Image: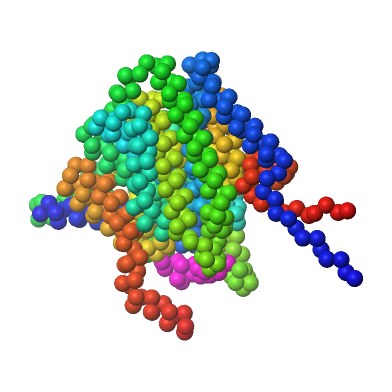
Amino acid sequence: MSKQPAPLSVQRWTPLSVAATLAIAGLMIALAFTPLFASAEVIDRLTTLFIYIILAIMWNALAGYGGLVSVGQQAFFGLGAYAAIRLSYWGVPVYPALILGALLAGAVALPLSVFALRLKGGEFAIGMWVVAELAHLLVNLDGLIQGETGTSLIALNAFSPDHRRADNYWLALAAMAVAAAVVFALLRGRLGVSVQAIRDNEEAAASIGVRVLGGKRVIFILSAIGCAMAGTLWLATSITFEPKTYFSVQWSAYMIFMALVGGLGTFEGPILGAILFFLMESLFGATGVWYLVGLGAAAVVFSLFLPQGLWGFIENRFTWRFLPIGYHLRLPEED
Amino acid sequence: MIWVSQILQGVLLGGYYALIACGLSFMFGVMRIINLAHGDLAVLAGFLVWFIAGQTGINPFLALALVIPLMAALGWVLQRTMLERSLRAGELVPLLSTFGLAIVIENLLFEQFGADTRSLAPYIGGLSYDSLTIGGQIYLSYLGIIIFAVAVAILGGLHFFLGHTNLGRAIRATAEDIDTAELVGINSRAVYAAAAAIALATVAVGGAALGMRATFAPYAGPAQLIFAFEAVVIGGLGSLWGTLAGGIALGVAQNIGATINTHGFLIAGHVVFLAFLALRPFLTSLNAKGRIKALLRRAA
């Protein structure tokens, strides 16, 4: 009598991912209390890091999972900051204006998605870039912004610098946690599976009943809101709004670098990429041009030789899965 | 009268856009790559012409004759070292690697030449401002007319080359179906490298045109890429004569926009491009006759 092959079991949580999730929860609690004792500089730097992580997560959600490479996410970064300034000018209290501004800028993505998501590959990439350029030109027309001169979020001056620094930090930390949690929840669920199917082969996915447009739209709007939130947080830390800086394609370069080097299409990768980017900027940012040459060169090298990024490499090499997003097939124990 | 003049200026500007776009269109048509470093490569060519003309004192047209083979060689090398590998890795990787290349090129140019804006106009004497007068009211610059003519000549030349030469046929066969082309003995790697070299040779001409008709600076590349891309898309991706039509549509839209409002030049161009993208599905369904023709051709 032939022995039946033992059935495979599907496992989502592994001991490692349970430990890692607990460690992350612990880290978040520690980070929440950091402003109570850390120096002003540390708080400012960490706030910047959180903004980078938000950008990296959002660009990765779009490109790494949705298969949509955008060179125009700075559109939302800039529109978020602009909306916050407008709302604050109209009398909305400044911190709610930052959050509401991000949501409003994200709302722009809904009508935009109708035509943007019909574009594929390079058409989408540059189409979004044109959207960002157009958004920049139109924001310049608003008298409040004074063209390229820009303006400031003066309402923030009502808070003392220390107070403001801590508030910005907590808002950035919370935004980062929410962004990561939302992307995590989406990717772990049905949507995650469907958008990855779309990324890998849109026609095949559609043929087995995946709602292609719906899945892409959710990711597109989510990414827009996230990038806009990063923009309003950037505004909160720098106070000044110069359209040229906010709508610069350099943000796309940063996002691509972080997601690509960390690991496109992995959850942990872009976070690692953002931390690396942050460290590189701290170490070499002062060298200016050469630093940017290095970022570009790294993007070339990683896309050619290590397209799965550092985290993808680590995952494949050591089969570490810190967070329970995927599925693991396990053979039952032999007796 | 101002409208006629603006539209004619737009047509000439469209010639420049078509010239800068034809390499992008050609590369996309053959290799299905959208090269995000396209604009920066054109600016690089502009700097090379400017540098050679400035250092040796030779005529910039002669300098361009030196830069064309240089850029073609660069195209060959890029294809062999970078694009070939990106192409194998899927649809998104070429976007990422060429975007990285764009950042490298523009920052190296900045490192080498600084932030100053440059122009080739001082080297071409009266050609930079002489113009043809029509009816005493419309001025068409000779340079604009030359650039338009060069664009038509290059597009026509590429068209003839693809249709009537062995290498052209090999390129079309490879673009159509790379595996079948290989089966009948075409070396697709060599064909792609040749196509990239041709594309960058046209980019050299486009970069020189940029330097002669206006000023440029190290970070001028992305704007050129966007204009070129808008021309290519409006004209129909991968269609060479369409690129000329797209360039003209963009140039005319920008000039009409500028006549309406001082900020209107760029806005009108982008709006027309995005409106075109939004309406394209309806336009293609209107074009049912063309589709039926294509079906019949396929059936035959």
Colour mode?
rainbow
Residue A17 drawn in magenta: no
Q: Give the residue at x 33% y 28%.
A: A94
- How many labels sit on residues? 0
**Quadrant position of residue A151:** top left
- Say which of A222 and A308 sits in front: A222
Q: Quadrant of the N terminus of chain A?
A: bottom right
Q: Give the residue at x 34% y 56%.
A: B231
Figure check: A43 above or below A18: above
Q: Is residue B177 visible?
A: yes
Figure check: A171 above or below A255: above
Q: Position of residue A52 (x, y in %)?
A: 50, 33
Q: Position of residue B257 (x, y in %)?
A: 21, 49
Q: Position of residue B16 (x, y in %)?
A: 32, 52
Q: Give the residue at x 17% y 48%.
A: B259
Residue B165 drawn in magenta: yes
Q: Give the residue at x 23% y 37%.
A: A142
**Quadrant position of residue B116:** top left
Figure check: B172 above or below B91: below
Numbered range of the magenta stretch: B159-178
Figure check: A165 above or below A114: above
A248 with respect to B81 (left or right): left
Residue pushed farthest right? A1
> What secondary structure is the stretch in magenta mostly built from?
helix
**Quadrant position of residue A299:** top right
Q: Is residue A242 visible?
A: no
- Say which of B146 and B55 sits in front: B146
Q: Position of residue B38 (x, y in %)?
A: 44, 48
A46 with respect to A73 (left or right): right
- Say which of A334 and A233 sits in front: A334
